[in-house]
Image (spheres, rainbow, N blue to C red):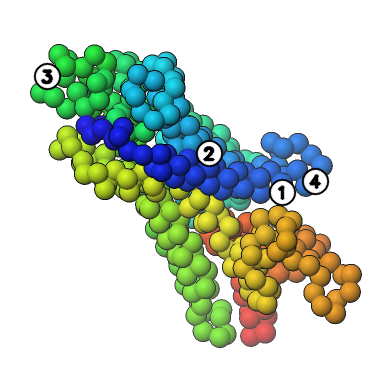
Amino acid sequence: MAMNYAEENIYVLIFMRLFGLVSMIASGFIIRDITRKLYSRPGAFLKKVSLTQSILIVMSIGDFGGAFFVQFISTWMVPFHSQLLGSVGSQQSCVAQGFLSTFFYSLSALSNASLAVAYCLIVRLGWKDKDKSKNRLPFVLTPFLISIVLAVVPLFGSNYNYNAGYSCYISGAPAGCEFDPNPQETCIRGAQARTMLLVAGLIPTLVAFFILTVAVVLLIHAVLVQERRMDQYQRAGRSRKMTMESFYQGMFYIGAFAISWIPWLVYGFKEYIFASVHKPSYFVMLAVTPLHGVMNAGVYFRPRLKAERERNPTDSTCKSLMQVLHIKCCCNRKSKEGAGDTPVITTDQQTEDDAEKGDEKKIQTNALAGDPKTATINLEAAQNAEIGSEKKVITSS
């Protein structure tokens, strides 16, 4: 980073750590929600985890680790001689922070792309999310291994240094020396940091965003094709409900990535090309990047919250949110008036009861609310229901 913000006051650090903490909590809710379902019945954990659930866990770990080491820890790992407020670290802790931030944020971005590809294949090729024949390891290990490589490469040439901001990342030492005409002469460490920033930071994130976008577009197109095929069997006219649900969920998914990473990409490319950046762009990037975990949690829980609000329209948003997050607090739902001591059935309980009764339509509806990330793009239940209606039409004719 060519600019020095060491003179900024404590309020910037407070907001950074606050945003990082919120992102960590949001990522923790995703992991808790998945593991809660997996441990709700007897059996081994790894035998129950599905393809998309395994990717979601890895992605949330990436968001959690990135927010922790970059935003929450921030200046505590910066070398103390930088004279930055709160810097109590050493050069070794600075290298560790740069390595871990590159690894976790790369893991998060690449896992987003891997998840989008997995959903696309589930819909277009008819994969089942829990099909044991579909090996989940490539979708999980590929982002992990690539992230390891991206984090290790800048170690050669000592490219992890204090970046004149609020943490250590790929930078020269002294900060900004990598942009000089002769960085080999002016840099004590990290003379190739400018190239490393492009190779290990900007390009992988940009590629992940491209893959994610293409996968979501192909997924929505596959849903549209499926619904068009079923138009001739629809008595009430054509329906595009699943297409629109997939479209909105896909746009939220792309938007969550774009809001968090585009400011960083713009900032990084401006720094790489022009060797200088504007202060506002730096603080915008600083504010939105740690919120990636919050954005992902919003996309994950949004369909379930929507279904909960539709099922109980008289409840407050707080009650519905606490119900979705499985949090017991002052605004959690209580038994309705006139219902006596009869407990209110939750989304997961309804799904289980419906499965026992074999009610296909209810299973489809509750799946949309109960498994938010996969709900709007999983056509298996919808296709089975429409195949059943197709048979009825043929029989009646």
Decide: few, some or many residues near mark 3? Use Cα within 10 Å; few <14, some 14-19, many ≥20.
few
Label 2: which secondary element: helix
Q: Given the current orientation, which residue lies at the most extreme left position?
A: 181
Give the labeled residue for mark 1: 37
Query: How far is mark 2 from mark 4, CA to CA?
Result: 27 Å
Give the labeled residue for mark 2: 64
Quarter placement of the C terminus: bottom right
Which of the two residues, 37 or 321, is positioned nearer the viewer here?
321
Query: How far is mark 2 from mark 1, CA to CA?
Result: 20 Å
Residue 299: horizontal and vertical position, in percent? 51, 56
Quarter placement of the N terminus: top left
Label 1: which secondary element: helix
Instruction: Indicate which label's residue lies in the foreground, 3 or 4.
Output: 3
- Position of 225 with respect to 313 (left or right) is left
Amino acid type, mark 1: Lys
Amino acid type, mark 2: Phe
* Residue 135 in sight: yes
Query: How far is mark 2 from mark 3, CA to CA?
Result: 38 Å
Which of the two residues, 329 or 270, is positioned nearer the viewer here?
329
Amino acid type, mark 3: Asn
Q: Going from the N terminus, do you reach mark 2 or mark 4 first?
A: 4
